Image (tube, rainbow, N blue to C red):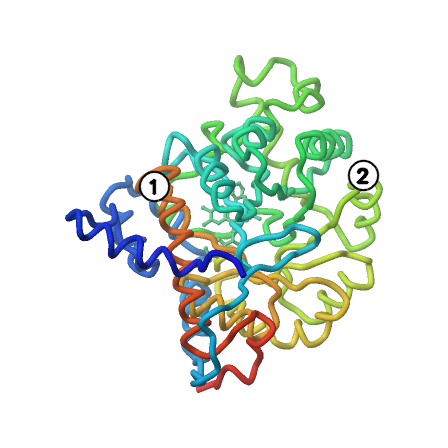
Amino acid sequence: MNQPLGGYQNEIYLQGLADQVPAFTTDPTRLADSAREILAPGPFWYVEGGAGSGATVRANRAAFDRWQIVPRMLRDATARETRTTVLGTPMPAPVLLAPVGVQSIVHPDAELATARAASALGVPMILSAASSNTIEDVAEASGDGPRWFQLYWPNDPDVCISILNRAAKAGYTTLVVTLDTWTLAWRSRDLDNSYLPFIRGTGTAIPFSDPVFRSGLAQPPEEDIAAAVLKWVPMFTGTDRSWDALPFLREHWDGPIVLKGIQHVDDARRAADAGMDGIVVSNHGGRQVDGAIASLDALPAIANAVGDRLDVLFDSGIRTGADVLKAIALGAKAVLLGRPYVWGLAHDGEAGVRHVVRSVLADFDLTLALSGHRSLAEATPDSLVRV
Ligand SMILES: Cc1cc2nc3c(=O)[nH]c(=O)nc-3n(C[C@H](O)[C@H](O)[C@H](O)COP(=O)(O)O)c2cc1C
Ligand SMILES: O=C(O)C(=O)c1ccccc1
């Protein structure tokens, strides 16, 4: 058995003896409110906002409230096993850090801080293709921690291959290919603020440091940032992809491949048919299709259809330990934590990310135990009721 993740609770209470309290809240559902007090409106809403009216952001959360945990007693869950292995990567709990780009808009240490925090906890960080730091620098900050890489699939095959080769060389084992963001949605908060970080060359460290991308520019990005941005933006999100392009990725990536952004059972089946190793059931945190189905509502049917053929991961709306338990019970092998850790970064850099992730993991461990589960396998649809 591992060191109980719930031990963070004792640690915090003991600090009270020395009159210390956590630097900011232990409740992930209150993090956005406190981050709003310390960030300018542009960056705050870039992270917090969703597509259009925000209907899918709200739906993602509401879906969790429709499932409730039914605690079971006298099952001796004093010792439990939260560890798991996903696609060859061991982790202390079924939680990874979702790929989130442009982290420098909330804290100068950006992805380097997130990588250090993740590595200290053994939690895999999925590095975004829109990172503010280069692949190589984030890899170094990760130390011996697990490394997954998220790709926005560039239209230019040579640039794509170059980025994949850099990720492999830097020790990234698993590729997550995001399909739902081949262009940005109508994001009214960002439009109202006229705020888009890439326009200023934020979140472009990976292409701007890429030798193949650079060789296609008349002048290096340091000398003409506008021209570099104009070349990158239409290239990097993979605007004209279809299912028949997937063999290209297999050819150029040796490790497991995960498709992120799946919401329909038929797309999940196609991913399995195409020999993919995993999918992330995700609607990008409600940032892409306003009015789309809550991601949690898409999960059970997808897990039933393909859960025995590939690893089904989940994100969009995970905030608390109970949310993690619900997604696991409904068939997810692991979940991705998104906005909450970004708020941790905004509050206190590396220590802030650590605090948020430890809080969610501790809450998950305690919720698992108190509801009578000794292992992840014991969390099944029978653990829940739909209300
Ligand atoms: C500020 C921000 C930037 C993001 N950038 C990326 C990205 O670069 N690549 C990607 O695949 N997903 C990106 N996402 C989506 C997350 O990976 C994840 O799907 C989403 O945050 C989950 O929703 P939640 O935050 O409500 O839990 C981003 C999300 C946010 C909030
Ligand atoms: O903002 C996002 O949701 C996102 O995925 C993204 C897209 C491009 C660059 C950075 C982040």
Q: Which element carries disc 1, helix, strand or loop?
A: helix
Look at the numbered disc 2 and say if its residue's Cβ is closer than 8 Å to ligand 1.
Answer: no
What type is the residue that disc 1 sits on?
Ala
Can you see residue 9? yes
Measured along the vertical axis of the image, is residue 64 above or below residue 223? Answer: below
**Is residue 131 positioned above or below 316 on the image?**
above
User: In this rendering, does residue 188 appear at all?
Assistant: no
List x then y, in percent, for residue 235: 66, 35
Q: Residue 71, percent across and down?
A: 43, 83
Comparing 239 with 177, the one in front is 177
* Percent x, y of residue 122: 53, 46
Q: Position of residue 77 (x, y in %)?
A: 47, 75
Q: Earlier in the sequence, mark 1 or mark 2?
A: 2
Q: Viewer-proximal residue, 263 or 164?
A: 164
- Which residue is found at the position 76% from the left and 45% from the top? 255
Question: Disc number at residue 32?
Answer: none
Report the Cα–Cα distance between label 1 and label 2.
35 Å
Res. 252 mark:
2
Q: Quadrant of the C terminus?
A: bottom left
Circle 1 residue: 346
**Number of marks in picture:** 2
